[in-house]
Amino acid sequence: MSAMVLNFLSAGAAQGLVEALRPQFEAETGATLQGRFGAVGAMKEALLAGEPCDVFIVTAAMVDALVAAGSLRAGTPAALGTVRTGVAVPAGERRIDVSTPEALKAALQAAEAIYFPDPVRATAGVHFASVMRQLGIHDALAARFRTFPNGAAAMHALAASRAPRQIGCTQITEIHHAIGVQLCGPLPERFELATVYSAAVAQAVAEPVLAQQFIALLAGPSARPLRLQGGFEL
């Protein structure tokens, strides 16, 4: 008899939490957790294209829309917490002041390269591109953009950069999860993006009991310290 497999599709903002809970879930159930992380838009495309999925983890707004559309099961969504978008620099570099729109604008203008996730399909990437437009610097800085499919990839590249004056932006949970980068702070209040993330059971679920069990672990009280440590606000 083959081992059970629980398939998931998840936004990158929840990667640290999922990976931290993987050993416990697999030990308790004997199942293998299998899936991938990416921009929320890409995860939606994969779900709708029929990629195997038991548990779907993205923004609460997208989860609600997909429940209404019949792609996710009603009554199953559970909120994981709120995630803010922040600015990072490589570990060991001086932290930059990004607490006001003026400070953020100056920091971006001084940067030689700007790392962030997909400005079309990733929640943080879409928002950050909009912030730069509002600051009036998007087009002038476009040649310095280094964009990636998701925030984890963007932060990995930022950590590996060796040139001076490198800066990045993505969800704070992804910054905390990445090795080799450090958080400078959230975006200024005027540009704040605080996104609630949820997990839900897919309509085409193959392992409904396991799916519910995994969601209960992700969103439950025992994982609360992990969620807080990883950057979720509860």
Image: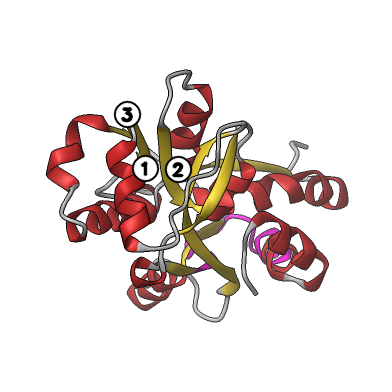
Question: Which numbered dot is residue 207?
Answer: none
Is residue 72 located in the magenta-colored stretch of the structure? no
Residues marked 3 and 2 touching at CB (< 8 Å): no
Most foreground residue, 191 or 126: 191
Give the residue at mark 3.
112
Reply above or below: 217 against 137: below
Most foreground residue, 82 or 24: 82
Which image quadrant: the N terminus? top right
Amino acid type at circle 2 is Gly
Left or right of residue 2, residue 81 in this image:
left
Is residue 209 located in the magenta-colored stretch of the structure? yes
Looking at the rendered structure, the secondary structure element under dot 2 is helix
N-terminal of the two: label 1 or label 2? Answer: 1
Residue 157 in the image, given as x and y percentages of width and height: 46, 27
Most foreground residue, 14 or 31: 14
N-terminal of the two: label 3 or label 2? Answer: 3
Q: Which residues are magenta?
A: 196-213
Which image quadrant: the C terminus? bottom right
The alpha-carbon separation of the residues under discs 3 and 2 comes to: 19 Å
Residue at horizontal 40 percent and vertical 66 percent from the top: 71
Q: Is residue 44 visible?
A: no
Question: Which numbered dot is residue 117?
Answer: 1
Which quadrant of the figure has residue 90?
Answer: top right
Amino acid type at circle 3 is Glu
* Residue at the extreme left: 139
Looking at the rendered structure, the secondary structure element under dot 3 is loop
Question: Which numbered dot is residue 151?
Answer: 2
Amino acid type at circle 1 is Pro
